[in-house]
Image: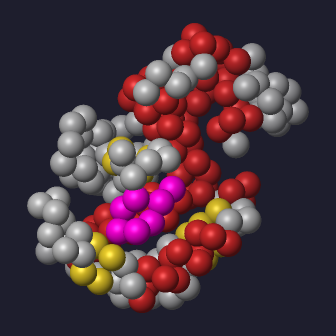
């Protein structure tokens, strides 16, 4: 959905017309500013590049395990101590496979470089649910946040296209309300709720 929206495709204007690209970005910003129904400090975005392995895993596994570790930490925090459920966008069986593994074995290290230990997602009450994003507000919200974060990180790395820079896509993430962002998800600055894996 975000890629269609920012490119002026998808007939999002009145349900049967296309936005111009600048108007599409303005609509995107309005939607992001409206995202205030999410609990405080609950939005965590993990971005990874091809690079060194983490606990013997690379690429998708690195990102998903880093996200699962932080989801677990959120659940067991003394102020929360809750059970949880996971929802994935339909059409990505690899997410569910990694989630199922993590419910049994989630290798977790420390910022001090100590040996990893297994800290599974055992507080998650059932198998992951799959939802099509067109029918699920939460999945659409996650897509919008993830794309905004990706544009910001691409700009930081010098990988954002000239067209997207001209549309200021790299500033979209800044339109999110501050309260839902988990600024403790990463110890490295900037503390903006985005975990940037090397």
Q: Is residue 54 magenta?
A: yes
The residue shown at (36%, 48%) is 197
| Residue located at (59% from left, 57% from top) | 139
In this image, 21 relative to 77: left or right? right
Q: Residue 49: give x, y in percent of width and height.
A: 47, 45
Q: Position of residue 17 (x, y in %)?
A: 85, 27
Relative placement, left or right, of 151 versus 115 is right
Q: Main SS of the magenta segment?
A: loop
Q: Is 153 placed above or below 59 here?
A: above
Q: Identify the magenta region.
A: 53-59
185 or 161, nearer to the observer = 161
The C terminus - image quarter: top left
Q: Measuring 34% from the left and 57% from the top, which residue is drawn there?
A: 42
What is the quadrant of residue 89 in the picture? bottom right
Residue 163 in the magenta stretch? The answer is no
**Which residue lies most toward the right here?**
16
Q: Is residue 180 left or right of residue 20?
A: left
Q: Above or below — where is 20 with respect to 157?
A: above
Rendered position, 195 above or below 94: above
């Amino acid at each position: 959905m975000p890629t269609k929206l920012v490119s002026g495709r998808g007939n999002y204007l009145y349900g049967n017309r296309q936005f111009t690209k600048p108007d599409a970005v303005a609509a995107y910003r309005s939607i992001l500013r409206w995202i205030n129904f999410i609990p405080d400090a609950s939005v965590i975005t993990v971005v990874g590049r091809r690079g060194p392995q983490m606990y013997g895993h690379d690429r998708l596994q690195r990102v998903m395990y880093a996200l699962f570790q932080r989801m677990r930490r959120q659940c067991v925090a003394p102020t929360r101590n809750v059970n949880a459920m996971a929802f994935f966008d339909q059409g990505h069986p690899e997410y569910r496979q990694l989630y199922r593994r993590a419910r049994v074995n989630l290798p977790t290290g420390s910022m001090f470089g100590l040996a990893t230990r297994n800290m599974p997602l055992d507080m998650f009450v059932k198998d992951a649910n799959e939802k099509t994003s067109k029918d699920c507000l939460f999945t659409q919200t996650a897509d919008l946040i993830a794309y905004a974060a990706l544009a910001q990180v691409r700009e930081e790395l010098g990988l954002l296209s000239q067209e997207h820079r001209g549309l200021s896509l790299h500033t979209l993430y800044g339109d999110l309300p501050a309260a839902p962002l988990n600024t403790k998800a990463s110890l490295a600055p900037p503390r903006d709720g985005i975990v940037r894996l090397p």
